[in-house]
Amino acid sequence: MNRPQQDIDRPEQGFESGEGSPPLSEWLVAAIGLALLLASMGYLLFDGNDGSQPPAPVVRMLEIQPQPGRFLVRVQAVNESRTTAAAVRVEGTLKRGNEVVERGELEFDYLPGRSTREGGMFFATDPRGLQLELAARSYRAP
């Protein structure tokens, strides 16, 4: 099966022989890919953890749930910084005026930057009729 010489030298239909530029659709897909890559890199650089700001945990009470023989105070810790904190210790103090009635505490193992975690403290005294102070007392770098 010998093919004539002119058929061998001639490119087949639908095949470009390297002449001309890529189709517009290829340029469009490449431009979209480049834009997505640059946007992703920009976001990571902007929102990256530069470590210059310390963690900023803020603690809020969510609710008080009576339980048999005790009271559960559900709390939420919000890290308002971009820096991660580990072993965040939260203290809850029940007060009647200046008198400390009871203390409770809990620890969040890991509180990433710009994140929220929830937990709870148990008290023997009903906190609903007292002043409840919540504070983040300590953390360590992960």
Image (cartoon, grey):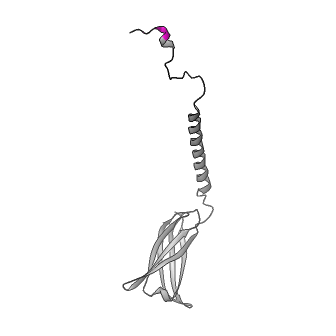
Count of all numbered marks drawn on residues in the image:
0
User: What residue is shown at x 57% (from left), y 46% (from top)?
Assistant: 36
* Left or right of 65 on screen, residue 40: right
Prevailing secondary structure class for the magenta stretch in the rendered image: loop
Which segment did they paint magenta? Answer: 1-6
In front of the other: 105 or 4: 4
Q: Is residue 43 left or right of residue 74?
A: right
Residue 65 spot, x, y in % from top left: 43, 81
Look at 48% across and 83% down and name the residue there.
103
- Whether 58 is drawn above or below 10: the answer is below
Residue 45 belongs to the span the image colors magenta: no
Residue 13 position in % (x across, y down): 49, 20
Q: Residue furthest left?
A: 68
Q: Relative to 22, say whether 89 is above or below.
A: below
Q: Position of residue 135 (x, y in %)?
A: 55, 77
**For residue 5: magenta?**
yes
Figure check: 64 above or below 53: below
Placement of 36 over or under 108, stated as above or below: above
Where in the figure is residue 134, as x and y percent of width and height? 53, 79
Q: Quadrant of the N terminus?
A: top left
Q: In this rendered view, identify the residue nearer to me: 123 or 130.
A: 130
